[in-house]
Each structure stands twice: as structure tokens, then as C-alpha cells.
Amino acid sequence: MKAAYYCGDRTVEIGECRVQSPSADQVRIEVAYCGVCGTDIHIYLGHQDRRIDMPQVIGHEMSGWVAEVGADVKGWTVGDPVVVRPLEACGACAACNAGNGHICQNLNFIGIDSPGAFQGSWTVPAHTLHRLPDDMPMTLGALVEPLAVACHDVRLGEVVPGEKVVVIGGGPIGLLNALVAQHAGAEVRVAEVNAFRLQAAHALGLETVHPLEEDLVSYVEAWTEGAGADAVFEVSGSQAGAEVMTKLAKVRGRIVVVAIFADAPKVDLFQFFWRELKMCGVRVYEPEDYDRAIELAASGALPLNELITERLPLDALPDAFARLTAGTDAVKILIDTQGE
């Protein structure tokens, strides 16, 4: 079996997988697919090097099967189809004691702070597992983690039927936010400047606007008859997105900050005062978001397969990172960790 190791300086090397037998409270998983996500790209670009013990396997958007079960683990057997919610909380900090272990102050994000899923065999704490339906394709299972992000975002964004929602940024997480908000009954517009992503949004049945070709503020004002959007999701991680988000929301509207910003952006705080806006930061997910994501994926209610640009073997991961960094010809690339 193989594994992909991030070595820093935009370098990913393919080597042998170090198979680790599970301890008493762990399981070992045979990984089927692992998607390349925005966080992985941040790592590839060196933005998270302080958290990485290089060379390290990264990746966390996965699906697979239980291959080995620790001595104290109950409820799981070899062959069970699973995904991993890759969060290990300390259980002792203020956030954990307040019931917010998903954003633990000492959080081990598995796949960043400890080894991840770009490998054929992956050993993780048993409490991180969620069961997939037996008939769910493993390709679809690999989309559960990013879909759970979107379920968390839309839930904390308090989106309800009939609202008008703007999603700034049409990458995979932006598109999933748009799909989940639309499924919740909202009218949605996706603002994106990349032609390939605009085309992908159209293929998913989403309405779009190109901010470099049409003034986004004027567009939203016309769409909402001068009221402004009920909720705005900033998923681009760009300075332009941070600047415009507060200009799009209605009086007492909601701003949901989803993106990871490499540098602290400038934000028009006057609009928060003037319109009495609310801003919510959203990070990762909670167990209920995973359960909802699995339910949505299994229902067929969302065109999730349309997000998958292609499936590649692990050897092709370095090239996949380069392509996704350029952002020109792919939405979601899945890595077949078992394929040659």
C-alpha cells in the first residue's frame, strides 16, 4: 500500500504506507477514496506548516471500510462502510466543558495535526466513525465530510425557507453551501469569478453572478428589491469578498464567514453598525451535521456526483494539488488510495 507525504514547499512525495495496528480504542480503516479539499491546498501552499510534523500524510475527506478493530471497541466489525469525522478533542478545556468540543482549544484535527487519509490504511479513534449505508458508493461517501461542513454552515446561518442567500465563492464548499441552503428552501445566488466554477455551478442548477462583469451590490439590490440578502456566506477567502459581504446583507441580516483567510482582511464595520448586522464564524462540524450530511447524500436530493471532476490514483496527487491551486479545470478531485 502507498501513502502521500507532504514535505513542505509545495512538495508531496509518494511512499510506502506505514500500517498501524489499532490500540484498544481505535480502528484501522482501509481507505477507499480521499478528496482534495481547500484545507489541503492551504497546507500544500505552506500556510499550515507550523502544525505539520513533516513528512506527514494529510487528507480527511474520505470513505472506506473497517479493516481491524481495537480490543475495547464496540459496535463496529470488519467490513463496515464508514467515514471519519476527523476531530479529536481534549475533553478538558473551556470549549469542551461548554459542549463545544468540535472547536476544542487543543483540537487535534486528524489529517492536519496528526496523520491523515491520503494512504491505503488509516488508524483513527473509534469515536470518530460514522456509518455509511451499505449501498452508498464510496465516491459519494468521500463527499460526506465537505457536505457536513455545509450542513453546519447553513444550520448556524439559520437559513429558513423563502430567504434570499448570497454565497460568495464557487469552490466545492461554496457550491455545497449553496446546494444545502437551496434544499432548505432559500433562493440562492453564487458569486464567482472563475469561469470553470461558474460552469460547474450552472451544471448543478444554481443561479450565478460574475462580480467582475456585473456590480454585485447593484445585482443583489435589484434581486431583493432594495432590501438586501437575508444571509451572506463568505466562502471565497478573498479581500474582495470580505469587503463586499457587509454591503450585500439586509438590515439585521446575517454574515456567515466560512472561508479560511491566509491574511487578515479589511472589513467594512460601519455596515455592521448601520444595518445592525450579525456575523457568525463557522468552523468544521458537529456530529449532527455528519448525520444530516449522510442522510442528504443517501437521499439523492442533491446532485453531488456532479461535483466530482475525476478520480485519480494516489501517484497523481502532486499533479492534482498543482491543478487545484491554479483553479482552472477541476472542482472536486477524488484520490483512489487503493488504485495503482
Image: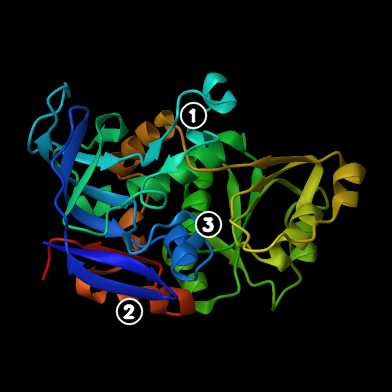
Q: Quadrant of the C terminus?
A: bottom left
Q: Which mark is residue 174?
A: 3
Q: Nearer the viewer, mark 1 or mark 2?
A: 1
Q: Which of marks 3 and 1 is nearer the N terminus?
A: 1
Real-space Cα distance between discs 3 and 1? Answer: 25 Å
State the image coordinates of residue 318 (x, y, percent, origin top left). Answer: 32, 76
State the image coordinates of residue 317 (x, y, percent, origin top left). Answer: 29, 72
* Image quadrant assignment for residue 207: bottom right
Left or right of 5 on screen, residue 80: left
Q: Residue 47 carries which label?
A: none
Real-space Cα distance between discs 1 and 2? Answer: 35 Å
Q: Is mark 3 on a helix, strand or loop?
A: helix
* Amino acid type at mark 1: Gly
Q: Which residue is drawn at 49% across and 57% down?
A: 175
Q: Do the residues labelled 3 and 1 touch (CB within 8 Å)?
A: no
Q: Is mark 2 on a helix, strand or loop?
A: helix
Q: Earlier in the sequence, mark 2 or mark 3?
A: 3
Q: Could you tell me if residue 38 is visible in this image? A: yes
State the image coordinates of residue 19 (x, y, percent, origin top left). Answer: 14, 51
Front residue of this view, candidates 221 and 2: 2
Q: Residue at x 59, y 42 (%)?
A: 282
State the image coordinates of residue 198 (x, y, percent, origin top left). Answer: 52, 71
Circle 2 residue:
319
Q: Which mark is residue 101?
A: 1
Q: Is mark 1 on a helix, strand or loop?
A: helix
